[in-house]
């Protein structure tokens, strides 16, 4: 099923608003907050041919429903200027322990997101990246699951 999808920054802001309101969970046993892990799906504006064979909403919903992470979000282009702002704002939340980004090449992610993570005070070593380009929906889900379960 090929679709030419065009996602705007509004989508990521909808998810971000939901994240912002639910990210901190009080842990009654320890008297403090529990550390959170999240997944960001970055889809190169939704127009890149390498994402056309996957249903991004099915990916996000599957990972969310299986409670593999505490939150999921979608951003159309994390490597753009508003992507840096998004990452800095999100990662400034000190209750986020690990972030998984499914999108392009992990080495590119490390280079592109390093400054935003550093400015937010987030240790880049807690960023786990996976390249899901040119995968079908089920393959992307399985790759993300494997990454999350091996790094948790």
Image (cartoon, rainbow, N blue to C red):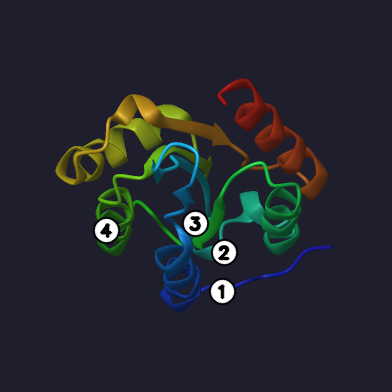
Sequence-first disc among 4 and 3 = 3
Tell me the element at label 2.
helix
Outermost residue toward the top?
150
Q: Is residue 116 above or below residue 10?
A: above
| Contact, mark 1 vs mark 3 (Cβ under 8 Å) | no
Name the foreground residue: 147 vs 76. 147
Tell me the element at label 3.
helix
Residue 49 seen by the camera:
yes
Name the foreground residue: 131 vs 52. 131
| Contact, mark 2 vs mark 3 (Cβ under 8 Å) | yes
Name the residue carrying label 2. 46
| Contact, mark 1 vs mark 2 (Cβ under 8 Å) | yes
Name the residue carrying label 1. 6
Sequence-first disc among 1 and 3 = 1
Residue neighbourhood size for the residue with mark 2, other residues' Cα within 10 Å, grouped as few (<14), some (14–19), many (≥20): many
Name the residue carrying label 3. 44
Name the residue carrying label 4. 89
């Amino acid at each position: 099923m090929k679709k030419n999808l065009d996602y705007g920054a509004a989508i990521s802001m909808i998810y971000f608003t939901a994240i912002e309101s639910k990210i901190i969970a009080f842990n009654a046993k320890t008297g403090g907050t529990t550390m959170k892990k999240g997944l960001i799906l970055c889809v190169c504006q939704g127009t890149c041919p390498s994402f056309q064979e996957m249903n991004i909403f099915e990916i996000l919903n599957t990972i969310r429903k299986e409670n593999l992470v505490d939150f999921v979000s979608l951003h159309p282009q994390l490597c753009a200027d508003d992507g840096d702002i998004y990452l800095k704002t999100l990662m400034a939340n000190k209750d986020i322990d690990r972030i998984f980004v499914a999108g392009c090449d992990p080495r590119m992610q490390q280079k592109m997101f390093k400054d935003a993570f550093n400015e937010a005070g987030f240790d880049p070593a807690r960023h786990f990246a996976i390249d899901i380009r040119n995968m079908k929906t089920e393959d992307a889900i399985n790759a993300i699951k494997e990454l999350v379960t091996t790094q948790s």
